[in-house]
Image (cartoon, helix red, strand yellow):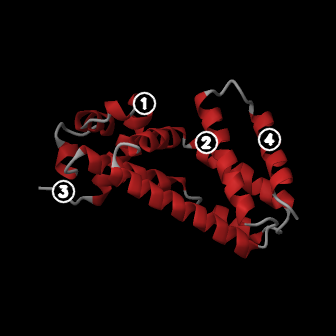
Amino acid sequence: MVRRNDERRASLVDAAIEVLAREGARGLTFRAVDTAAGVPPGTASNYFTSRDELLTQAGARVYERLQPDEETIARQRAASPDRETYTALMRELVGRVSSFRTGYLALLELRLEATRRPRLRTVLTERVRADVEANVGYHLSSGLPGDATAVKLLYLAFNWLIVEQLTLPEVLDEAERDRLIAAAVERIVTP
């Protein structure tokens, strides 16, 4: 019987994200999730019918946790639609994603695992596509300079910038990261 306590389920999925970041996809077991969540052995297996289901839900949850809060969105919408605002928005985005280090590392593990698991690939494809479409839609409605191609190019560039920062932090310091963000906006986003 699969349990329905939504709070406990979310806690277990969050624990799975931590396990994925720390141990990789091979280390993701029900037992490891139980330990990370601090619950009795067998709890995760009562909430998830399979390891595939746990991987899929972890993939969806990472994207939920990466969303900006309402205050950040309101502040962004109130700012003037210019390159300086765009640069500040991109710095906030890279900082927010980078601050959820375990989530992003888990997402990298999930992306690799998705090459072998069609269901997970479908979930991640839908989430990434929706994220890109939402970013393009927000951008176009905000009046910020640039077009949909610029949004997609920045999305791709900053994803790798984040990977670099989280996996090899000695390569870039924060000041260099900020200069690169500003340069990317300056070179990619046309007025």
Image height of 47 relative to 37, above or below: below
Q: Indicate the secondary structure of the residue bearing disc 2.
A: helix
Q: In the rendered structure, which disc, 4 or 2, sits on the residue that comes first in sequence?
A: 2
Q: Residues within 10 Å of mark 1 (few under 14, many from 20)?
A: some
- Residue 180 has which mark? 4
Mark positioned earlier in the residue sequence (3 or 4): 3
Seen at 76% across and 66% down, the residue is 147
Q: Where is residue 154 in the image (x, y as percent from the top left)?
A: 71, 52
Give yes or no for contact between labels 1 and 4 (Cβ–Cβ under 8 Å): no
In terms of depth relative to the viewer, which is nearer, 16 or 72? 16
Marks 1/2: CA–CA distance: 16 Å
Classed neighbour count for the residue bearing mark 4: other residues with Cα under 10 Å, few (<14), some (14–19), many (≥20): some
Location of mark 2 (residue) = 98
From the image, state whether disc 3 or disc 4 is nearer to you: 4
Q: Is mark 1 on a helix, strand or loop?
A: helix
Amino acid marked by disc 2: Ser
Crowd class of label 3 (few under 14; some 14 to 19; many from 20; radius 10 Å): some
On the image, numbered disc 3 is attached to which residue? 3
> Is 3 located above or below residue 142 in the figure?
above
Q: Please name the amino acid that badge 3 sits on.
A: Arg
x and y, in percent, of residue 37 in the image: 31, 40
Disc 3 vs disc 1: which is toward the camera? 1
Query: In which quadrant of the rendered image does the N terminus lie?
Result: bottom left
The first of marks 2 and 3 along the sequence is 3
Q: Which of marks 3 and 1 is nearer the N terminus?
A: 3
- In what element is the residue under mark 4? helix
Drawn side of residue 158 relative to residue 64, left or right: right
| Residue at image point 44% right, 54% down | 124
- Using residue 150 as the reference point, say whether residue 49 is left or right of it: left
Figure check: 13 above or below 130? above
Q: Residue furthest bottom?
A: 141
